[in-house]
Amino acid sequence: MAVTVKPQQIALAVSTDPMLPVPYRVLRVRRETSDTFTFEFGSVDGSRFPFAPGQFNMLYLFGVGEVPISISGDPERPEILVHTVRAVGTVTKSLCKLKPGDIIGVRGPFGSSWPVVEAAGDDIVIVAGGVGLAPLRPAIYHILNHRGEYGRVVLLYGARTPGDMLYKKELAEWRGRFDVQVEVTVDAAKPDEWRGNVGVVTTLIPRAHFDPHHVTALVCGPEIMMRFTILELQKRGLRDDQIYISMERNMKCAIGLCGHCQYGPNFICKDGPVFRFDTVKEIFGKREI
Amino acid sequence: MTTLERLLAEHPFFKELDPRYIQLIAGCAQEVVFKAGEFIFREGDPSNKFWLIRSGKISLEIFAPGRGPIIIETLGEGDVMGWSWAVPPYRKQYDARALELTRALEFDAMCIRGKCDEEPKLGYELFKRFAQIIGQRLQATRLRLIDIYGSHS
């Protein structure tokens, strides 16, 4: 039987003070795309890092700044902390220059998680766009580690081009399994470099095999992509309480004090980043929020 | 019910279409197979056919001088290919090529137009369905125009 640690139980597992960064050393770096890297970290004191799929950490690059980054490793391998980082701002650009042996500070894990335990018995449809696959990867690991507890499992992934896809080797492995439907699409491609689907990720939803009455959907990507994905899932007959999304805002303190990540009545750092859609649907996509 | 009529009735595009109309349009349809790599039509060709894909995969491509062919969309099982037969100037706007062995139902557009003229209700039903396809493709195109996975996202 799967045991998933509840986020609130984990919150103090790494440090007794959530504002105090704990030193972690870079063990390995893998280039995913031209601007995205996956890092494996190990704690300097050898401690483990339990977390729940969907949670995030604050990564502190000393002297540069701190950014919230989702955890993208296997929750059943807490000895290695994995983060996939895209170089888009000052801190993330500097993070992407880290080499094995470098030290960063880690605060976390923070936030809510994907309902991988609650969804046992259901079909699972996972819809990821761009780097949105990174926060979903721990959930995918969990589901595949406990494959027998779920019905059909479908992973739909959209990226900008074939060169922008994350985790290509793993996608190929998952696709090679007989118990997972994996569909990948890109926004544009040349015929000599790509023989897969071309089109937005929402076009894959009508082709996915799942029972709309007994399915849990996990969705992560740019907000516009999530908006249209939800519409397609609703067309397939899913209720709002069957859909979970992961939201992104500018988290600072990560413990619900500073208000930087306020999202209507919620703080994304503490009430999210994972929300059941019916709990945020009134504010989701609202320009003012 | 003939095999062709059954295939039409089972296709999602014709879901819940009156069996009378299925019988009518079946007279304009035939089963076809495209080999991997085969061009189904080329940009500028007269648009006198459309297809319902039963299995396989087709790429819609545009040739950009200096950049070569670019796949703008792929279509697969359950998709409809071709709506330019319904609107002037009745010309194909892209190249279409089978990426793998593809089975489809091919429709003679002239024949369909004739049936629609005879049975305006059938025409209304068909155009409602094509309008939905055109709307979906337009929405997908707009989403890609935004470049949602770009570095700003």
Image (cartoon, coloured by chain):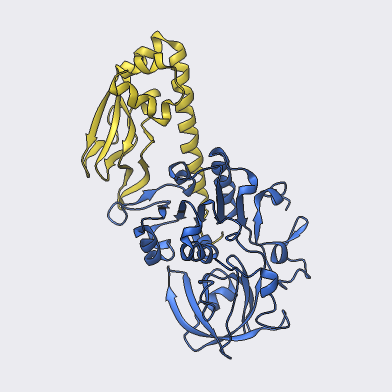
Chain colours: A blue, B yellow
Q: Residue, x 53% and y 53% (percent of image)?
A: B148
Q: Is residue B90 in view?
A: no
Q: Residue, x 29% and y 36% (percent of image)?
A: B43
Describe residue A4's horizontal placement relative to residue A201 as left or right: right
| Residue B9 image-quadrant placement | top left
Image: B136 above or below A50:
above
Q: Which of A155 and A148 is in front in this view?
A: A148
Describe residue A89's horizontal placement relative to residue B121 as left or right: right
Q: Which of B149 and A236 is in front in this view?
A: A236
Describe residue A145's horizontal placement relative to residue B62 as left or right: right
Furthest residue in direction top, as rendered: B118
Image: B149 above or below B71:
below
Residue A167, position as x, y percentages in the image? 42, 66
Residue A77, position as x, y percentages in the image? 51, 76
Q: Which of A173 and A199 is in front in this view?
A: A173
Q: Residue, x 30% and y 29% (percent of image)?
A: B105
